[in-house]
Image (spheres, helix red, strand yellow):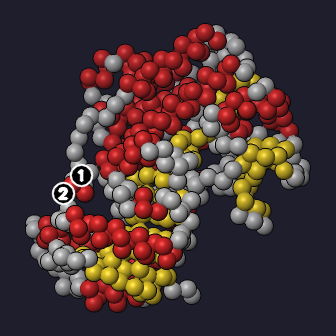
Amino acid sequence: MTTFHTASFKDRDAQVVIKNNEVYRLIYDSYKEPYEKLMQSGLYEMLISKKMLIPHIETENFEPVYKTLKPQKVFVSYPYEWCFSELKDAALLTLEIQKLALEYGMSLKDANAYNVQFFEGKPIFIDTSSFEIYEETKPWCAYRQFCMQFLAPLAVMAYKDERLVSLLETNLDGLPLDIASKLLPKSSWLNLKLLSHVHLHALAQKNYSGCHKKIEVKFSKFQMEALLNDLTECIKNIKLPKSKTEWGNYYNETNYSDESFEQKRKIVNVFGEKINPETVVDFGANNGAFSRLFKEKSKLIVSADIDFSAVEQNYAITKKEKETNILPLVLDLCNPSASVGWANEERSSFFERIKDSELVLALALVHHLAIGRNVPFSKIAKLFSSAGKNLIVEYVDKKDSQVEKLLSNRKDIFDDYSIENFEKSFGGFFDIVEKRHIDNTFRTIYLMRRKEK
């Protein structure tokens, strides 16, 4: 069965299709000349050698198309699930590709953040049909899109609040520049590059919004290169202020002794070896300490947490250690990324993309959901069962200091919060394979296997 990918319907030159769970990109006759230029000019080989573009093979054609490509498969994540540094690295990659494309007589016809994914620990461009033949007198047609998809969100995250990246989920075409300009503080007007590319750009858009006359602008290659260098410097200079969030320093503030923490690691390791999973989803991963227990045995580890500071730290470790199979993402389990866009199908929900993972990790998390967010055990169990076939989960008793902290400023209405009810509720969706108590703590680790219908 062949189906068109729900995110590729806007492209008239190429489309992505799914057949037998494999991904293909169909190149139509209208894109023949740019595609041949990409492949024959040396640009494709250059980008592949630098691991900046996803490689593909040409395969048997889907009729009636010019070429059928089979790209290497990647796990898809979205800009509104990335931390600041991930979005920044994706922006710099896009600019670097545009610079290289110019050297080979080509140009990116769009600067869509969704054309970048994270593969083997680094951002990589996945849209082979985004290149066009460069015409020297024309400006970069993707400039406005780059500012909306990358520059404006990064500036707002750095100057105001990282959580504002969530605006991209309701603005799939990018953060409107007039909104970004209003959100940014007055001090940002003193930054000449932000003044030019965000504030004045927004004013120009407003002034020309009612103009229906085509505006011809001659733009030399030298000017193009100067623009790209200016944008690159602008992006590099946008930095997050040093800040501390509640759980960003979690492992330095935990109530574990060193011995108990090490015992927990060993238990998770033992349980993990019984599954030997290729795919892992770690909910509440913090900085990825327990995600990394699986990096030698798993192909993909989605390491997700609600805390931006923790995800920043996780991504920094991934880069420093050159880890190729860990993907840190921002995720609020009580409000995960939904299916959005055209017909609510253009961008898939988080749980649609990670469903049927081989292992779900949920360590030191359930009490935050059950007491911190008032979610019943049965709802938590059902959600976890939709994500993976096996589960390693930690139960934290009310006597634990972290639970006491959650209850310190509120009435304890959680009469059903007990290990008996935990096991009963999770038992409706999972078979309990094994459980082990962590010595000198009020915590128990479970290995569970999903009940198949």
Amino acid type, residue under disc 1 in the picture: Asn
Nearer the observer, 193 or 60 = 60
Residue lying at 58% horizontally and 15% vertically, measured from the top left: 225
Q: Is residue 217 left or right of residue 407?
A: right
Helix, strand or loop for disc 2:
helix
**Position of the N terminus by quadrant:** bottom right
Name the foreground residue: 84 vs 318: 318
Q: Up-down: is 401 above or below 154? A: below
Toward which corner of the image does residue 46 lie, by quadrant? top right
Q: Which mark is residue 60?
A: none
In the rendered structure, the answer to whether residue 293 lies left or right of residue 188 reads: right
Q: Quick check: 166 above or below 95?
A: below
Q: Quadrant of the C terminus?
A: bottom right
- Residue at figure coordinates x 82%, y 29% from the top left: 40
Circle 1 crowding by C-alpha within 10 Å: few under 14, some 14–19, many from 20: some
Question: Residue 433: percent from the left, percent from the top?
Answer: 43, 86
Q: Where does residue 432 sit, x and y in percent of width and height?
A: 41, 87
Q: Which residue is mark 1?
A: 249
**Vertical order, 107 against 302 (above or below):** above
At x 40%, y 85%, the residue is 434
Can residue 332 be seen in this snapshot? Answer: no
Are the two marked residues, 2 and 1, in contact with CB atoms closer than 8 angstroms? yes
Percent x, y of residue 13: 77, 40
As helix, strand or loop, the secondary structure at mark 1 comes to loop
Q: Indicate the amino acid at tag 2.
A: Glu
Q: Can residue 448 be seen at all in this image of the molecule?
A: yes
Give the residue displayed 18% in from the left and 85% down from the top.
415
Which residue is label 2 attached to?
253
Give the x, y percent position of residue 306.
34, 56
